[in-house]
Image: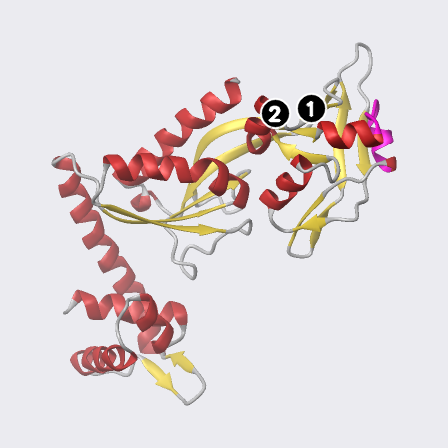
Amino acid sequence: MNTHDLTLFVRIADCESIARAAQQLDITSAAASAALKRLEKELTVQLFIRSTRKLRITAEGERFLLHCRQALHTLEEGKASIDALHGKVSGELRISAPSDLSRNILIDCIDEIMDQYPALSIHLVVSDSMADFYHDRVDIALRYGLPEDSSLIAFKLAAFERILCASPKYLSSFGVPSHPEDLKQHNCLIYQLKNRIFDIWDFESEEKGKNDSLKIKVSSNRSCNDGDVVRRWVVAGKGIAYKSRLDIAEDLHAGRVIRLLSNFRTPLLELNLICPTRKQVTPAVLILRDTLRKKLNMLLRN
């Protein structure tokens, strides 16, 4: 069978559209339709039920899709293993990563890797939402915390705390909080994801003899579902932010923001590189993992 036709079939199933699949593969819709008909003729089954508005996969198509995905992945694995024998890293690596990490750290790592391995192609999907590995067509995801699905493969990249921070400009205008309770009188920049608003910030006292655990509900005139926008707001003096130390590390080092309430502990975060299966752990994935670990370690040491 023609592997291009198989790839197109998988893409059509994922997109639920011949036109969108054709656009992603940079071919015409007519060529995609012809390829699908060719594959159906070879299999002697109908893979999709077509209508003017909708495309629906058939029972035979669903069954063939499982084998098709596995076959294409096995071929990719075979090529990757040959490339690894010759010290080559090639092919396509599709990555999903959060906004802060992507814009401020990951793009530099990607540039470094692609300069070293020019045969490698990388597609980056920037989103703070957890990717669907099949529907979003990503090979790996970089995410805070361990995945809820224990069948996924997770490589720990770094661990760090959240920190409270604000710009010198904001602090000179509105004062420096001395206790988490003081945050109720400040404009606290709020991050939100889908329907969840992160407006309760956790703290624990580090003073001797005290073990106070505090949950402070904060308020703000600004909220955003993009973590990097929240970072830009805090640097611009629009309020106080509760950010991972990793995301704000360079701003802290440069003095663009100042850490607040350092005598209170905050929850630790863990950044992981997540793969759907062991099969996705290719040489390119391992190179990205090691490059990121080195970069993150340098940032967090400062």
Residue 260 relative to residue 141: left or right: right
Q: Amino acid under label 1?
A: Arg
Which mark, by number, is residue 252? 2
52 is higher (above) or lower (below) than 40:
below
Q: Secondary structure at mark 2?
A: helix
Q: Are marks 1 and 2 in contact (CB under 8 Å)?
A: yes
Residue 128 relative to residue 281: left or right: right
- The N terminus: image quadrant: bottom left
8 is higher (above) or lower (below) than 203:
below
Q: Position of residue 24 (x, y in %)?
A: 33, 66
Residue 128 relative to residue 180: left or right: left
Q: CA distance from mark 1 to mark 2?
A: 7 Å
Residue 51 inside the magenta-drawn segment = no
- Numbered label tally: 2
Residue appearing at x 46%, y 31% in the figure: 156
Q: Position of residue 267 (x, y in %)?
A: 66, 29
Q: Secondary structure at mark 1?
A: strand
Identify the residue under disc 1.
259
Report crowding for label 1: few under 14, some 14 to 19, many 20 or more residues within 10 A (C-alpha).
some
Residues shaded magenta: 175-184
| 62 and 249: which is toward the camera | 249
* Quarter of the image where one finds residue 109: top left
Q: Among all residues in the image, which is located at the extreme top?
A: 208
Q: Amino acid under label 2?
A: Leu
Residue appearing at x 46%, y 21% in the figure: 298
